[in-house]
Image (tube, rainbow, N blue to C red):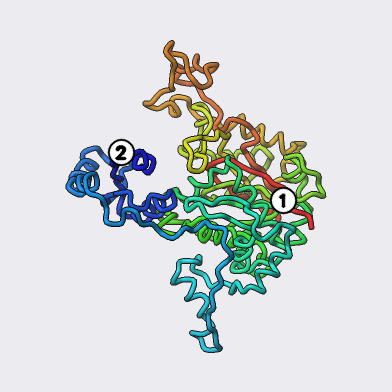
Amino acid sequence: MVAVEKAGIPAVGIAARSFARAWQSCVDGWGQPSTAFVTIPHATTGQQPDFIRNMVDEQIDAIIQGLTVLPASLGTSRKARNGSQATETFIVEMDETPEGLDAVNRFLAERDWSDGIPVMPPTPAAVEQMLKGTKRQPQDVVMVMEPGFGLATVEKIAINAVMAGCRPEQFPVLLAAIDCLAQPQMNHRDMQVSGHTEAPIILVNGPIAKKAGINSGTSAMGPGVVNAANTAIGRALRLCLINIGYCKAGAGDPNYIGLPTKFGMCIAENEELSPWQPYHMDKGFKRDESAVTMVSVTGPTDIIDSSSKTHEDTLSNIASMMFYRNAGAGGWIRGWQSAQVGHTNKRFPYQGPYHPIILSPSRAVIMAEAGMSKQDAQAWLHKNCTISLKSVLGTRGMAKDASGAWLEHPELQHLENDPEATITALESPEQYLLFVSGGSTHYANFFYGTYGIATMPVEEL
């Protein structure tokens, strides 16, 4: 819509009422804050044509006005947010009264600069201390965060790390996580502005996990002092997404209901108890190197494995969780997903989704004792997690060329009219991301992945 307006063609957006703030946030970020739009009571997804038509008809006068009348705000916009000027400093007076102790949090809340939970005051001294956790320069730009196109400098990331309660030794993990987020296959813009309940999960491998104090044992994703590092790192990433990416609840983030997972998720692999080599070694790193992997996910779902007698029972329990229709089940047959690249019309193709399966050490041991490597387990899931081709094709069928040949995977076209044909739910075994973490028990957790995956090294100090 913004591109149409910038081309000189009048345009009016139509947004569900609950997306009004999100619309304004997005067009602000794209540099066209006066782009006209009208609101209708409900989202159109899944609604009947007559219902949609009636909602839009009620707004026809406003649509005509948006197409024919210049807005009063034309030519004005919010002050540029992405400049490289020195960091602005604010003075907030505090005292020992309840109101005085909460002054910083009230200051931040008034500006929508928080996740709603009390934060540590990001004083200049605290930020300077955080910056000692990296060799990078304060004004180095790690990435441009969407949807607001904020420049994620090392200093800005450090400010949010302080607010979240991070310590300097945890800062390299956060920076590596944002290095992951910057990779185009992460499709972080869609993650940020989606109405879907998805969020990034940070998976940590190598010596940095112990150095940073990340819990990889019992209750690794829960509350408590033992999880202080896990909580702080995950929360710091979310604060960066809010304050640098301008993904604020109800505005840049229009998620219809949200999930507690959006406050932040960070765990380390339990490399000590795992019978398999750690995940970062699967990606080509050495055991004594440190790496961070990031995946965008929704969920999680508990996998209860108390009645299993064999390794195949355990794998069958995991496989039973794999069939959420809109989470990659057979979608690969239509071709890879793609991410929009910044302000351009370019798209970056990537393989996805990747489904993290967080195994307790004892569940991994069951498979290892049966002689299965991690790759064997992934191959088993890939072979046994299938879906009917008919259900994937639906009423749309497949895109075809002029001769009638499938544009994607023509080698499978011979199955088109076979009512019994099945295909694998995911394209490759590696998309079942097996990660051993937590205490030793008969549970596992399954997350539905939504986009791509990235693994980046952690800076060594």
- Residue 461 appears in the rendering: yes
Disc 1 and disc 2: Cα gap in Å?
59 Å
Q: Quadrant of the N terminus?
A: top left
Q: Is residue 400 above or below residue 302?
A: above
Mark 1, secondary structure of its residue: helix
Determine contact: label 1, label 2, CB under 8 Å: no
Q: Is residue 289 above or below residue 370?
A: below
Q: Residue at x 50, y 39 (%)?
A: 340
* Res. 449 image quadrant: top right
- 10 Å crowding of disc 2: few (<14), some (14-19), many (20+): few
Q: Quadrant of the C terminus?
A: bottom right
Mark 2, secondary structure of its residue: loop
State the mark number for residue 389: none
Mark 1: amino acid: Pro
Of pointers 1 and 2, the one earlier in the residue sequence: 2
Q: Residue at x 51, y 24 (%)?
A: 422
Q: Is residue 127 above or below residue 333?
A: below
The image shows a total of numbered marks equal to: 2
Which is nearer the eye, 311 or 220?
A: 220
Mark 2: amino acid: Ile
Which is nearer the eye, 165 or 425?
A: 165
Q: Residue at x 81, y 47 (%)?
A: 287
User: Mark 2 highlights which residue?
Assistant: 9
Which is nearer the eye, 109 or 289?
A: 109
User: Mark 1 highlights which residue?
Assistant: 361
Q: Position of residue 137 (x, y in %)?
A: 69, 58
Q: Position of residue 415 (x, y in %)?
A: 49, 17
Q: Position of residue 212 (x, y in %)?
A: 73, 62
Nearer mark to the viewer, of 1 and 2: 2
Which is nearer the eye, 329 or 102?
A: 102
- Residue 261 appears in the rendering: no
